[in-house]
Amino acid sequence: MAQLSTFMCDECGTQKKESNHWFRLKVVPELPGHMEVSVWDPPPPPPHIKRADLKDMKEFHVCGETCLAKSISKHLK
């Protein structure tokens, strides 16, 4: 049986649909203010670049530019 994955916006709780234009925000706690933003449509394949030095990188999925801006602002504080 196929497994169905449901993704929710980490900022507002909206469920991901096929037509949404989502973003991934990666935050590195060891490097305050360091973030990476990328388009997340469809979910990306596993990364081909290993980042052993950034073990605690946290990844957030947000449903659009408004939630992306809120999430970036929250992680800059």
Image: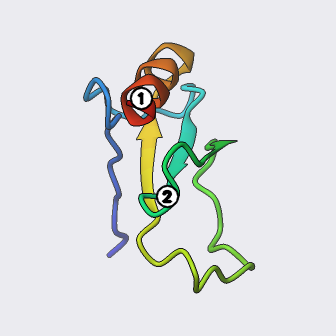
* SS under mark 2: loop
Look at mark 1 in the image and give the residue it sits on.
71
Q: Indicate the position of residue 43 as horizontal and vertical percent values.
A: 57, 54
Along the line of sight, which residue is nearer the eye, 75 or 25? 75
Residue at the location (32% across, 29% down)? 11
Residue at the location (49% across, 29% down)? 72
Tell me the amino acid under the disc marked 2.
Val
Residue at the location (58% across, 82% down)? 53
Between label 1 and label 2, give the one nearer the viewer: 2
Instruction: Count every numbered label the image shows and give the total.
Output: 2
Q: Quadrant of the C terminus?
A: top left
| Quarter of image, res 15 | top left
Q: Is residue 42 left or right of residue 76?
A: right
* As drawn, 16 above or below 54: above
Q: Residue furthest right?
A: 48
The dot on residue 28 is 2
The span from disc 1 to disc 2 (Cα, nearest Å) is: 14 Å
The dot on residue 8 is none
| Quarter of image, res 9 | top left
| Quarter of image, res 38 | top right
